[in-house]
């Protein structure tokens, strides 16, 4: 018998999809009674722009990738130096798009607030799309004399377009330390049929937000802020200088109707201009 022909087998592979990478770092310092940029680094799809006007130094984070999808990696590090005021916000709502199976978009944020400084973390809402998969991690270190205001809001699908989330994953963790001691920790895990989970656990809410104020006057603001909340939201004083709000609403529009008055009250002033656009 002659030699049989050899047939080569070629494995067909699917080319990996392009993934976004973004990193930004900013530090504020005091100079002549004003808060100015001490250091700045930005790379990839993360950019920071600094509008003029307003109190302190304001930094607007821009995601030039247009959103987050599976496999993306974003990292932000910000420091409010001694006796400075730094506000961090976003250009628009962040969008978490559908991801390929087994791929997770990751967002890592690190904040530090120094002696006598104030940092306001005021990003606009994150909107989850069907099949999205995102893991977010936030760690904050506060000096004993620092002031800190934080908001993170989440919209579960585009209600106006009739979208409901039957397959999505969102994992979020927040840790805040003052002088090295843990004063606040919160974690959220949504996976699978998110709409059904929210219907069972939160009355079908389609949007939610968490707000934290760590400041000496937090206790005095508890009663006033409760007066502006809707019937599905609440405020708790975790310590004399630590106030926590949890907000629920049917959709993103309803959430903002409650969230904006609460933030204005807690911040004693106007919100970043990007929130009004």
Image (cartoon, helix red, strand yellow):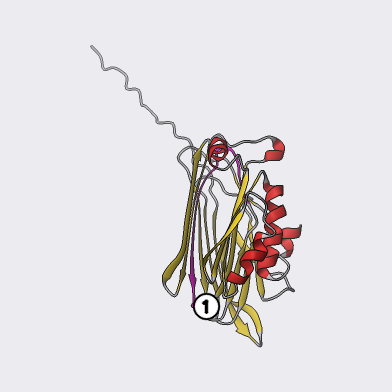
Q: Does the magenta run of residues contain 130? A: yes
Where does residue 83 sit, x and y in percent of width and height?
Answer: 58, 82
Residue 48 place in picture, x, y as percent: 63, 65
Q: Which residue, as the protein is rendered here, is positioned at the far left?
A: 1
Instruction: Check the image and name the residue furthest to the bottom.
Output: 32
Q: Position of residue 116 (x, y in %)?
A: 56, 81
Q: Residues within 10 Å of mark 1 (few under 14, many from 20)?
A: many
Residue shown at 66% from the left, 50% from the top: 231
> Tag 1, which secondary structure?
loop
Q: Which residues are magenta?
A: 126-145
Does residue 90 appear anywhere in the picture?
no
Q: Nearer the viewer, residue 104 or 128?
A: 128
Disc count in the image? 1
| Residue extending furthest toward the right | 277
Residue at 35% across / 22% down in the picture?
7
Question: Where residue 181 sits in the image (x, y, percent)?
Answer: 41, 70
Q: Is residue 98 visible?
A: yes
Q: Residue furthest top?
A: 1
Is the C terminus in the top left, top right, bottom left or bottom right quadrant? bottom right
Identify the residue position indicated by label 1 in the image.
114
Left or right, 122 with respect to 14, comes to right
State whether the magenta stretch is mostly helix, strand or loop.
strand
In the rendered view, would you say 268 is above or below 128?
below
Against 28, residue 104 (above or below) is: above
Q: Which quarter of the image is occupied by the N terminus?
A: top left
Q: Nearer the viewer, residue 113 or 230?
A: 230
The residue closer to the viewer here, 235 or 48, is 235
Tell me, yes or no, whether the highlighted magenta stretch contains residue 194: no
**In this rendering, position of residue 75 left or right of residue 160:** left
Q: Residue at x 52, y 42 (%)?
A: 17
């Amino acid at each position: 018998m002659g030699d049989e022909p050899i047939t080569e087998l070629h494995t067909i592979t699917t080319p990996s999809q392009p993934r976004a990478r973004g990193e930004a770092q900013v530090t504020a310092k005091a100079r002549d009674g004003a808060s100015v940029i001490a250091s700045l680094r930005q790379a990839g799809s993360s950019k920071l722009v600094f509008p003029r006007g307003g109190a302190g130094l304001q930094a607007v984070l821009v995601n030039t990738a247009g959103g987050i999808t599976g496999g993306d990696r974003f990292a932000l590090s910000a420091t409010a130096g001694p006796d400075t005021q730094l506000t961090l916000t976003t250009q628009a709502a962040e969008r978490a798009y559908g991801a390929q199976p087994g791929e997770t978009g990751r967002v890592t944020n690190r904040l530090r607030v120094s002696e006598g400084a104030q940092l306001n973390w005021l990003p606009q809402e994150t909107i989850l799309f069907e099949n999205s998969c995102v893991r977010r991690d936030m760690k904050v270190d506060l000096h004993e004399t620092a002031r800190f205001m934080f908001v993170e809001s989440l919209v579960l699908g585009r209600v106006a377009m009739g979208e409901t989330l039957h397959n999505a994953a969102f994992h979020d963790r927040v840790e805040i330390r003052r002088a090295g001691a843990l004063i606040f920790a919160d974690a959220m895990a949504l996976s699978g049929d998110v709409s059904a989970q929210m219907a069972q656990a939160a009355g079908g809410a389609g949007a939610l937000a968490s707000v934290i104020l760590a400041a000496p006057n937090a206790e005095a603001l508890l009663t006033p802020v409760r007066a502006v909340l809707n019937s599905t939201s609440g405020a708790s004083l975790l310590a004399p200088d630590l106030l926590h709000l949890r907000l629920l609403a049917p959709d993103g529009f309803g959430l903002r109707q409650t969230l904006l008055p609460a933030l204005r009250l807690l911040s004693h002033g106007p919100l970043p201009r990007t929130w009004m656009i």
